[in-house]
């Protein structure tokens, strides 16, 4: 334990000599969490809607009210019959245009099909699909209401035989930020942990002190723990600041050590750590893009990304209140990364011995 304590104290002294980097490691994640936590939002609300009501009947006004009284659409324009509705989409005055043809109310009264048209701006396909889903849901509600009224007028029971009563758990308001923020925390902590541990070991290589550590009476596990413990503490402090949660960091720290065994300069370690942690953590971890909709070959690659397992654990703890026992496969995967890092560092040490 004395040897391990000596390595830890040495690393702490190195950190104290660079207070700016220490401040960045602790304060930057909190700042980025607040910044991106508000900026990243996939919820589609208050879509700008233009309505061209060519029928101007009570039935058409009811349909318009169904759209505008929801939280999904905001009425921004009411072009008259004959006006160019496509221009509203081209100039981005509206994201959707509802066109109610003449005779809409008369067709409904006669029991005939009454078509309406919805024009959408498809430049953003994801948003357009979401808006289309909202419109279909609102029209379905209107259809159910019309059927119920028709049955009531005919003297028959107008209540629907099937009533759906949904209950949404863990994220009742379906806010995308509730899903994104845990992933953002994982991304920030992985980025800082990878860079800090990788730069720590590579700094020893650049200064020529790695050989001194190699000839010192240190076991491999003592060197690994001595290098990771100070940055583990820094990462825990950063985590406490942003959400009072400090779990799963071993995977990221181990990955930083793995990079340090490959890179020989701090600049290379920084670039490798940035590429190996930031890009996979954003693209291949499930942080933003769902893994299940990726091609099969790309899904296979995601199993090599530590953030994939880390984010599953973090979201389960934060959103569902689960314990680590529920996510033992993900914990095992992170431990495997730690073991791989230790083996790689040990092999690197043996390589130095052979070179000597």
Image (cartoon, rainbow, N blue to C red):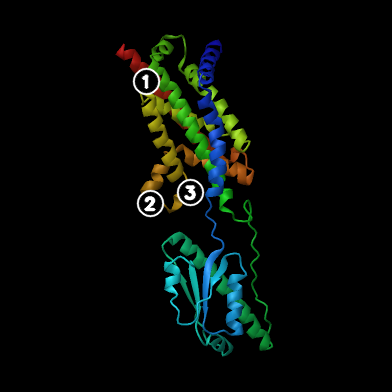
Q: CA distance from mark 3 to mark 2?
A: 16 Å
Q: CA distance from mark 2 to mark 1?
A: 36 Å
Quarter of the picture containing the N terminus is top right
- Tell me the element at label 1: helix
Seen from the viewer's position, the closer of residues 124 and 146 is 124
Residue denoted by label 2: 295
Which is nearer the N-term, disc 3 or disc 1? Answer: 3
- Please tell me whether residue 101 is drawn above or below residue 268 in the rendered image: below
Quarter of the picture containing the C terminus is top left
- Please tell me whether residue 67 is drawn above or below residue 17 in the rendered image: below
Where does the image place residue 348, in percent across and percent down from the top left? 37, 20
- Tell me the element at label 3: loop
Q: Residues within 10 Å of mark 2 (few under 14, many from 20)?
A: few
Q: Quadrant of residue 153?
A: bottom right
Residue denoted by label 3: 288
Where does the image place residue 133, in percent across and percent down from the top left? 51, 66
Q: Residue at x 53, y 45 (%)?
A: 36
Q: For residue 335, say whether it is visible.
A: no
């Amino acid at each position: 334990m004395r040897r391990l304590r000596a390595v830890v104290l040495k690393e702490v002294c190195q950190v104290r000599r660079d207070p700016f980097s220490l401040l960045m490691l602790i304060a930057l994640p909190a700042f980025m969490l607040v910044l991106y936590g508000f900026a990243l939002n996939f919820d589609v609300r208050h879509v700008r809607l233009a309505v061209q009501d060519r029928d101007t009947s009570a039935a058409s006004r009811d349909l318009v009210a169904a759209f505008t009284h929801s939280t999904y659409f905001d009425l921004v324009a009411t072009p008259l019959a004959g006006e160019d509705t496509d221009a509203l989409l081209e100039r981005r005055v509206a994201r959707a245009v509802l066109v109610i043809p003449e005779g809409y109310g008369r067709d409904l009264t006669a029991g005939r099909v009454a078509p309406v048209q919805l024009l959408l701006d498809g430049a953003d396909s994801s948003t357009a699909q979401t808006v289309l889903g909202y419109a279909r849901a609102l029209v379905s509600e209107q259809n159910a209401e019309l059927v119920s009224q028709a049955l009531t007028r005919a003297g028959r029971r107008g209540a629907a035989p099937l009533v759906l009563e949904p209950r949404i758990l863990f994220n009742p308001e379906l806010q995308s930020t509730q899903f994104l923020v845990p992933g953002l925390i994982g991304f920030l902590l992985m980025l800082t942990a990878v860079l800090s541990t990788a730069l720590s070991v590579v700094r020893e290589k650049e200064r020529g002190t790695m050989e001194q550590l190699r000839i010192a009476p240190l076991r491999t596990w003592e060197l690994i723990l001595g290098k990771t413990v100070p940055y583990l503490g820094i990462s825990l402090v950063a985590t406490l600041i942003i959400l009072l949660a400090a779990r799963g960091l071993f995977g990221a720290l181990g990955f930083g050590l793995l990079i340090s065994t490959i890179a020989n300069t701090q600049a290379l370690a920084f670039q490798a750590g940035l590429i190996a942690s930031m890009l996979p953590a954003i693209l291949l971890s499930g942080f933003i893009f769902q893994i299940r909709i990726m091609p099969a070959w790309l899904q296979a690659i995601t199993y090599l990304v530590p953030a994939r397992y880390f984010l599953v654990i973090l979201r389960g703890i934060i959103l569902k209140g689960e314990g680590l026992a529920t996510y033992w496969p993900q914990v095992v995967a992170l431990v495997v990364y730690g073991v791989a890092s230790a083996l790689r560092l040990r092999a690197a040490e043996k390589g130095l011995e052979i070179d000597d």
